């Protein structure tokens, strides 16, 4: 069987549109693609449609028209659990009754990942994100930045077809934010899966991305490398 890390993964959105009312249309016919190992940042001001696009990719909302394709398969009408995506929200979405270790392992256990592999993946992300001393604590015993690191760790261990990140560094302190930002692109690149990252922080977009999509009022204004942007 082919190792899952060697499979080339691809995300495509084709003519994606989301209209709540005739006058409220946050996403207006967006088309773009993200290949394996590519890091696409959706950049723009509040209300430009970037988080709505992320939710459409995740299956948290249904498009008015257009398609979301993962590895060539149309997943536009599938629920989030059937898309093999992993998402980090601005909020932490951790289980309060579980330890850090249990939170990180929860998604893999649901997918019946072998116990030895679970432990190996947890140790890898714990070493990188500095979580070793926190593994037996529960979310209520952690700072905001620590909870955010756990949420990022839970995403990294999943090895999904697509990573979706909605401003995951927003609650980290400045020093840790700089460290994680410097390593994040390399770490996600090693997962060999498309990454879609939402931010309004231009420094983050230019530091992390292989491609940047500049959005305004629901329109894709520019799609290019950070250097060209």
Image (cartoon, helix red, strand yellow):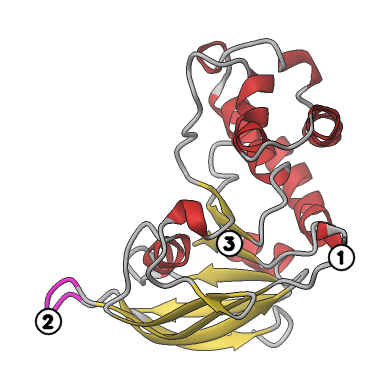
Q: Residue 78 lies in magenta, yes or no? A: no
Q: Can you say which quadrant of the picture contains the C terminus?
A: bottom right
- Tell me the distance, in whole angstroms, between the alpha carbons under discs 1 and 3: 22 Å
Residue 6 marker: 1
Residue tagged 3 = 197
Task: Label 2, secondary structure: give it.
Answer: loop
Q: Position of residue 219 (x, y in %)?
A: 38, 85
Q: Pointers 1 and 3 in contact (CB under 8 A)?
A: no
Q: Residue at x 13, y 80 (%)?
A: 23
Tell me where residue 51 sits by quadrant: bottom left
In screen coordinates, is 96 left or right of 24? right
Residue 144 visible somewhere in the drawing = yes
| Mark 2 crowd level (few <14, some 14–19, many ≥20, 10 Å Cα) | few
Write the start and end of the magenta stretch as one range.
20-24
Q: Earlier in the sequence, mark 2 or mark 3?
A: 2
Query: Where does label 2 land, which residue?
Result: 22
Q: Quadrant of residue 148?
A: top right
Horizontally, residue 183 falls left or right of residue 89, namely right
Image point (64%, 62%), residue name: 203
The outermost residue toward the left is 22
């Amino acid at each position: 069987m082919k190792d899952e890390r060697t499979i080339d993964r691809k995300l495509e959105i084709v003519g994606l549109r989301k209209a709540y009312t005739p006058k409220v249309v946050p996403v207006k016919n967006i088309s773009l693609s993200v290949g394996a190992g590519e890091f696409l940042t959706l950049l723009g001001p509040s209300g430009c449609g970037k988080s709505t696009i992320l939710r459409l990719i995740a299956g948290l909302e249904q498009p008015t028209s257009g398609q979301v394709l993962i590895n060539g398969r149309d997943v536009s009408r599938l629920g989030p659990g059937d898309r093999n995506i992993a998402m980090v929200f601005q909020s932490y979405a951790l289980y309060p009754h579980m330890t850090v270790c249990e939170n990180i392992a929860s998604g893999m256990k649901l997918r019946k990942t072998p116990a030895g592999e679970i432990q190996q993946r947890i140790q890898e992300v714990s070493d990188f994100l500095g979580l070793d001393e926190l593994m037996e604590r529960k979310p209520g015993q952690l700072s905001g930045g620590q909870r955010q690191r756990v949420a990022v760790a839970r995403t990294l261990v999943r090895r999904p077809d697509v990573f979706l990140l909605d401003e995951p560094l927003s609650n980290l302190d400045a020093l840790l934010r700089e460290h994680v930002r410097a390593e994040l692109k390399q770490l996600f690149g090693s997962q060999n899966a498309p990454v879609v990252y939402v931010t309004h922080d231009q420094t983050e977009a230019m530091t992390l991305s292989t491609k940047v999509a500049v959005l305004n009022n629901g329109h894709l204004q520019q799609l290019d490398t950070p250097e060209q942007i």
